[in-house]
Amino acid sequence: MVVAYIIVIAAVSFIARKAGATSEGFVCGGRVFPAAVIGLFMASEVVGTTASIGTAQGAFTYGISAAWNLGALGIGFIVFAVLFARRFKQLDEVTISGALERGYGVGVRRAASVIMIVSLLLVATAAYVSGGAMISALLRIDANWAVVIVGVLSSVYVVIGGMRSVIYTNLINVFVKVVGIVVVAVSAYSAAGGYEHISVSLPSKMLDWDGVGWNQIGAWLIAGGGAMFATQYVVQAMTAVDNEAKARNAGFYTSLVLIPYGFLAALIGVCAAVVHPDIDSIQALPTMVVRLSPILQGIAVTGLIASVFGLISALTIGASTLLLKDFYQPYFNPSDNERKAVRFARLSTLGCGLIPVAAALGASDVLGMTFLAKALRASLAVFVVLMFRRPSYGSRQGALAALCLSLPAVIGWYAAGDPFGIDNAYIAILTPLLVMTIAQLIGRGTKASAPLARTPSTAATASVADSCRETARTDT
């Protein structure tokens, strides 16, 4: 079943390869898509192995409240749909850094791009760790080899087809993931003896919705929900719909998948704590999969591998797009040589898929690493909110200083073990707010400006969306 799934994914990527013949087609898909398609696409991007295995791992230790891990993302997409989807669609920018440049200038664009790339590669590292642990346990191969196999396979098929293949294959992935998680959750609940047996076998705190603590839940809401306002693949997905209403609806569709998925993944972790209390927490979900019959096990394993592929594909093409738009094109290809741009887009996509493999071989804290990455994106979310809601607050120089301080501050706080019980997510929010407040009080520097919808004055050449539609017409 896994082999059949990989063949289907490879075939879809091969069919979609024409859309990646140009650099704009490679990074935006070459056409527009319905809101439901983009909503499911974004859900598939979020629900990777880190979300599945990491949430089950958290629930094995802290209980059902680990479901807030994904629930916070679902809430974030609802807020994004209500407050920001329309505005992002009006900007018609393919990168989050490009959107921030509208309000804060080119210096902030470069700094935001670096932070986003670091964040995406951190998530990719966590995805490889959890995916390698899963495949190692289920297929009984060495964990390091499992990481390498996942890295190579999930990177190559994105290189073949670009953004359009990512969208199409993630529609397959999200269906397989949901079916797989439901199968495992039902089996795990039965194996644990139902609610009554679970409630007498575990401490009552394991079944409390605030068992993990409101400090942690608040951090998840800030780092997870807030990160959705400023995530590269979310902004990139907005260019694939053709109007503001579809952009808003896509956010709602995403939340409809994430919230129940989070509950099911947490339920599996709780059940694993009953059935196998002595295992390593990261093996909570894989261990419950092993208990299934061969056919159901095949469905579950395929769903988990789809989780790896879906997430990695979004991360690699997102990081590649940032490298192409913010660094390669302005510094190394100012003449916009299309052949060079396409070659770089493909090579950087492959590199962004393989670089985290080395880091994954020595990493272990899946959930912590994931939310460190989300905390970094939450720093960018502060500027998204200010840009759209209070553009006159602070200054452009203050924004650049805040971003330059946020990256070392958040990573340093995380490396120090979150001193005083303060999660790094709070540092991610407070650092830019503090710097921008100081800039506001001092009153020096150039004020930010409210970003406007694309006009001839804001785009000297055709927009990314226009290029995508032209690519679609050419393909047709």
Image: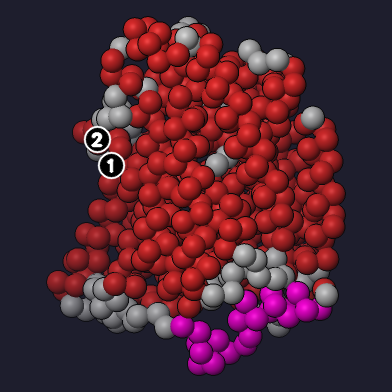
Q: Does 117 sit above or below residue 456?
A: above
The answer to whether mark 2 and mark 1 are in CB contact below 8 A is: yes
Q: Position of residue 239 (x, y in %)?
A: 58, 70
Please, what secondary structure does the residue beneath circle 2 have? helix
Q: Position of residue 470 (x, y in %)?
A: 73, 80
Please state the total of marks drawn on the protein image: 2
Residue 438 as seen in the image, left or right of residue 410: left
Residue at 48 percent of width and 78 percent of height: 90
User: Quick check: can you spot residue 371?
Assistant: no
Q: Does 79 sit above or below residue 470?
A: above
Q: Position of residue 85 (x, y in %)?
A: 45, 67
For the record, the magenta segment spans: 453-474
Residue 39 or 367: which is nearer the viewer? 39
Residue 68 or 191: which is nearer the viewer? 191
Q: How is the image coloured?
A: secondary structure
Please, what secondary structure does the residue beneath circle 1 have? helix
Residue at 63 percent of width and 85 percent of height: 462
Q: Which residue is mark 1?
A: 218
Q: Amino acid at mark 1?
A: Gly
Q: Which residue is mark 2?
A: 214
Residue at 40 percent of width and 33 percent of height: 67
Residue 415 or 424: which is nearer the viewer? 424
